[in-house]
Image: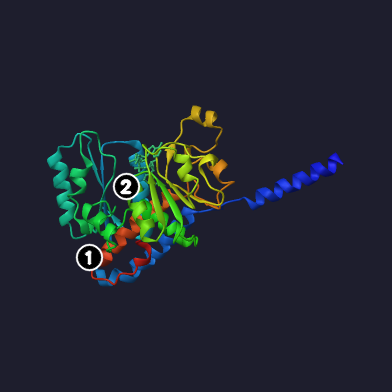
């Protein structure tokens, strides 16, 4: 009897774990598909344009994480045929010299997109430099004019990370209209443009931030939970409604001792306790391999669409710019 029960409960358990497996939203796979599409757009337009798309990434200082991000972006450019115009500048660069670098790239006819890798060294105010990039060359969609265009629903370059999230949701046919979305984080880089894009897609959006009270009560109501708080493994099963879609934007490198403490294998983790939330959610992004590759892919989308615009080619990427 007890054996039967044990087998039965074992089966029930297996069945239940099957039923509860969340769909993994694979950003790496989608980013590869987008690269193929962009590569073919470039070869289609190359003869008429007379030159390939050009992207300039400006890196100031020697922050190791920024070095990895910039290198990944340049490798992605090389894979699809975008020419890189990297500028690696010392951390003690004079303000006027950095402004001069941006001016030169603004007037370089072979450069379609310019990205200032953040964060800048503490002595430099990023807002002062971001606003110097021509809005038409703003590969990151962070210029005031482009954020205004997003707010008003006008076309323009879009912030890469939230645009990548929207593309990932769309490619997995995840419905947004009429859904209750909660975005954790209100940064200009992620949270704010994410909320605007979801609102434009007809979600009912709430933005939570560091002063939000009773966060879990709010997040428990979300059909769609976007987490961009910048705190490793902060969101767990207590925050998530059953069958919610959970997007983890956070990315953190973990030290060896923390790996043991947290009982996880990967050296990277997000803001979400994946192994816990995966059992409750209907779909979830992994870290790594979720939002990160989509951010790079959308940088390429912005660069290629800027190139099409500058070279008078027909614009073919509108479906990817929310
Ligand atoms: P940020 O530090 O500028 O903003 C964090 C936001 O989270 C703030 O608005 C803050 O109010 C909010 N927040 C902090 N603690 C909170 C709490 N306890 N409860 C609710 N809200 C809280 O960070 P960011 O630039 O928006 O990035 C967020 C995370 O996303 C970071 O981990 C960053 O590394 C990651 N990121 C990943 C990608 C990617 O491509 N995967 C791109 C950009 C940022």
Q: Total of numbered circles in the picture?
A: 2
Please rate how many residues cluster around mark 1, counting C-alpha atoms within 10 Å: few if below 14, some from 14 to 19, many from 20. Answer: some
Q: Is residue 92 left or right of residue 208?
A: left
Quadrant showing the C terminus: bottom left
SS assignment at label 1: helix
Q: Position of residue 21 (x, y in %)?
A: 61, 50
Q: Which mark is residue 310?
A: 1
The residue that label 2 is drawn on is: 189
Q: Is residue 258 above or below residue 18?
A: above
User: Residue sitting at 84 percent across and 39 percent down?
Assistant: 2
Q: Is residue 304 above or below residue 28?
A: below
Q: Position of residue 299 (x, y in %)?
A: 33, 55
Which callout, 1 or 2, points to the residue nearer the camera?
2
User: Residue sitting at 37 percent across and 63 percent down?
Assistant: 320
Q: Which comes sooner in the sequence, label 1 or label 2?
A: 2
Please rate how many residues cluster around mark 2, counting C-alpha atoms within 10 Å: few if below 14, some from 14 to 19, many from 20. Answer: some
Q: Is residue 36 visible?
A: yes
SS assignment at label 2: loop
Q: Quadrant of ligand 1?
A: top left
């Amino acid at each position: 009897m007890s054996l039967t029960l044990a087998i039965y409960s074992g089966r029930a358990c297996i069945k239940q774990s099957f039923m509860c497996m969340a769909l993994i939203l694979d950003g790496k796979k989608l980013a590869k598909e987008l690269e193929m599409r962009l590569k073919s757009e470039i070869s289609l337009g190359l003869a008429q344009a007379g030159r390939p798309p050009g992207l300039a990434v400006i890196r100031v200082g020697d922050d190791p994480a920024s070095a990895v991000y910039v290198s990944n972006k340049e490798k992605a450019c090389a894979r699809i045929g975008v020419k890189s115009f990297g500028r690696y500048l010392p951390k003690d660069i004079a303000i006027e010299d950095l402004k001069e670098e941006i001016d030169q790239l603004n007037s370089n006819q072979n450069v379609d997109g310019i990205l200032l890798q953040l964060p800048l060294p503490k002595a430099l105010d990023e807002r002062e430099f971001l606003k110097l990039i021509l809005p038409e060359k703003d590969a990151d969609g962070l210029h005031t004019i482009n954020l205004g265009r997003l707010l008003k629903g006008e076309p323009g370059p879009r912030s890469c990370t939230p645009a990548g999230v929207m593309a990932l949701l769309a490619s997995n046919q995840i419905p947004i209209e009429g859904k209750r979305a909660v975005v954790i984080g209100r940064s200009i880089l992620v949270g704010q443009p994410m909320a605007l894009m979801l609102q434009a897609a007809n979600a009912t959006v709430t933005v939570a931030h560091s002063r939000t009270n009773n966060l879990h009560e709010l997040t428990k109501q979300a059909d769609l939970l976007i987490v961009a708080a910048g705190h490793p493994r902060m969101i767990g099963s207590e925050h998530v409604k059953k069958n919610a879609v959970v997007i983890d934007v956070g990315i953190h490198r973990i030290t060896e001792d923390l790996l043991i403490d947290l009982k996880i294998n990967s050296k990277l983790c997000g803001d979400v306790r994946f192994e816990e939330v995966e059992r409750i959610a209907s779909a979830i992004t992994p870290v790594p391999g979720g939002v990160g590759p989509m951010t790079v892919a959308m940088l390429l989308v912005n660069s290629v669409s800027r190139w099409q615009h500058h070279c008078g080619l027909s614009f073919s990427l509108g479906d990817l710019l929310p």
